[in-house]
Amino acid sequence: MEILPIEVIDKLVIIVAVFGISLVIAMYSTLAERKVSAFLQDRIGPNRAGIFGIFQPLADGVKFFMKEEIIPATADKGLFILGPSLSMLTACMTSAVIPWGDTLELFGRVIPLQVTDINIAVLYVFAVVSIGVYGIMIGGWASNNKFSLLGALRASSQMISYEIAMGLSIVALIMTTGTMSIGEIVYQQGGELYGIGALDGFAWNVFYQPLGFLIFMICAFAECNRTPFDLPECEAELVGGYHTEYSSMKLGFYLFAEYINMFISSAIMSALYFGGFNFPFIDKLDLSHNWETIIGVGFFFTKIIAFIFFFMWIRWTLPRFRYDQLMRLGWKILIPLSILNIIITGLVLLLTL
């Protein structure tokens, strides 16, 4: 009975750490977004608030808090508040099943760097992501604004459409790995599943499921409402989309949720297809287990940052699709490709096992 409180404290520390890291990365992703766009467009970007503009996110946060809280007179006040709160909640919940590193051995105890490792983690992620649609839909409908409602309808239709292709792409990965535990999938990419000795830590699933990864990544852009899939907040025709009527920190919640979703999507892609905290020749370093874990965490976040940069690179390179092009890509191209990938994976497994 004495061990239980210590384990609970371990989990609480990890939860608080992951929550804090998610908020900090989301906050500084706003600065990174503007710096990357400036780099790609040959300009400077924010550089007034602190050295290289490092205090710009803090200045933006103070600005959001100081702005007036406005709720339209004709809006449904309860749902108007619930919308951004639900988006922020679901964005943070997804991180619970991601293994951020191996285990740490402290004070004679083994502490896994994961909030929880359930055997249906993949289903949990899709369940939480599907709830996130309601945050956008509720906010757009509760605003009692036709532009907000159109943005919410676009968001819900595109997220539901691309969730199908994303789920089908994961089916092929589950067929290959034989598990829905994200922790187990990460451990398998250390080389044990495929019997790789010389390249321990480099048996990444992207080499076995390249088409599945490509489909998953495209769908992740659509799930995060990122360019070229940012039709729900298309300012050219919808003013600001589903959050047109929002101000102050309610608007901040929606914007934060988008960047947290981008961070979590990058973490999930890194874990499922790029080995997570595994890195090449991990067993050849001859270091203590704790140091290997710390270096693995560093590699994991390096992969995440690389994906975040790729999200931003695409945003400032490609124009947004028309809505009919968006839906055609999802239903007529990605879903058939996902089904084809499942068939090919099944045939390969049938012939090789």
Image: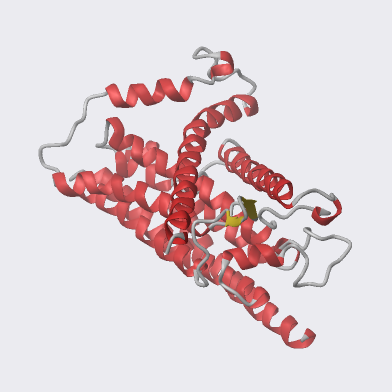
Q: Is residue 228 visible?
A: no
Say left or right for 308 vs 330: right
Look at the image and tell me in which quarter the N terminus lies. bottom left
Q: Position of residue 143 (x, y in %)?
A: 20, 44
- Along the viewing direction, whichever of 322 and 158 lies nearer the viewer: 158
> Does residue 350 sit above or below 106 in this rendering?
below
Say left or right for 121 vs 137: right
Q: Position of residue 278 (x, y in %)?
A: 72, 55
Which residue in the rendered view is the most extreme toward the left? 73
Say left or right for 93 vs 226: left
Write the residue at 50% across / 40% down. Answer: 21
Write the residue at 62% across / 74% down. Answer: 172
Say left or right for 181 vs 8: right
**Quarter of the image holding residue 94?**
bottom left
> Does residue 110 sit above or below 251 in this rendering?
below
User: How many numbered marks does the figure carry?
Assistant: 0
Q: Position of residue 72 (x, y in %)?
A: 15, 36
Q: Position of residue 104 (x, y in %)?
A: 63, 52
Q: Is residue 309 visible?
A: yes
Write the residue at 66% across / 48% down. Answer: 300
> Does residue 262 sit above or below 131 in this rendering?
above
Look at the image and tell me in which quarter the C terminus lies. bottom right
Which residue in the rendered view is the most extreme toward the right? 198
Display colour scheme: secondary structure
Write the residue at 36% across / 41% down. Answer: 254
